[in-house]
Amino acid sequence: MKSIADIATSLPGPVNVADRLKPSASRSSDDVLTRKAREFVGLTFFAPLLKQASDPVLKGKYLHGGRGEQVFRGQLNELLAMRIGQSSRLGIAEALVRQLNRDSSAQAAGGLDLEA
């Protein structure tokens, strides 16, 4: 039977967990860019639709949640818009990602001056 000292010396050195979990840098940045583009599409296109659809036609004295309902409804609409943007396949987010990648590669090559 092995002793604890034998087991401890056979173990590899310290492991950086972040390095193991993180995929390659380019794939990771593309995934983040795609996710953010989809959120942008959701908040830009779907949030106004949800706000319009959730506004009550008749705001009466009764059966209305007041300010709390308005705040909650706004937060719910924002969350729903982001989720719809993540799951929608309209192609707007993908086109945005392609354009941003094209611009960043052109800037890296020195052909695009974004400062001017």
Image (tube, helix red, strand yellow):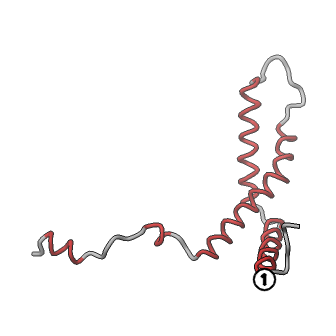
Q: Position of residue 97 (x, y in %)?
A: 78, 70
Q: For the view shown, which residue lies furthest in the left direction?
A: 1
Please tell me how crowded label 1 is: few (under 14), some (14-19), or many (20+) other residues with Cα within 10 Å. Answer: few
Q: Nearer the viewer, residue 53 or 101?
A: 101
**Residue 99 vertical position relative to residue 81 in the rendered view, above or below:** below
The residue sitting at 73% across, 48% down in the picture is 80
* Apparent side of residue 112 relative to residue 65 in the rendered image (left or right): right
Q: Position of residue 14 (x, y in %)?
A: 34, 70
The residue at which mark 1 appears reads as 109
As shown in the figure, which amino acid type bears the numbered disc 1? Ala
* Apparent side of residue 16 relative to residue 7 in the rendered image (left or right): right
* Apparent side of residue 7 relative to residue 14 in the rendered image (left or right): left
Q: Nearer the viewer, residue 100 or 64?
A: 100
The residue sitting at 78% across, 82% down in the picture is 109
Q: Secondary structure at mark 1?
A: loop
Quadrant assignment for the C terminus:
bottom right
* Apparent side of residue 3 relative to residue 21 in the rendered image (left or right): left
**Residue 6 vertical position relative to residue 41 in the rendered view, above or below:** below
Q: For the view shown, which residue lies furthest in the bottom direction?
A: 109
Quadrant assignment for the N terminus:
bottom left
The residue sitting at 78% across, 55% down in the picture is 42
Quadrant of the rendered image containing residue 12: bottom left
Q: Nearer the viewer, residue 64 or 105?
A: 105
Q: For the view shown, which residue lies furthest in the top direction?
A: 61
Q: Nearer the viewer, residue 67 or 25?
A: 25
Q: Position of residue 32 (x, y in %)?
A: 66, 65
Count the marks. 1
The residue sitting at 75% across, 36% down in the picture is 73
Quadrant of the rendered image containing residue 104: bottom right
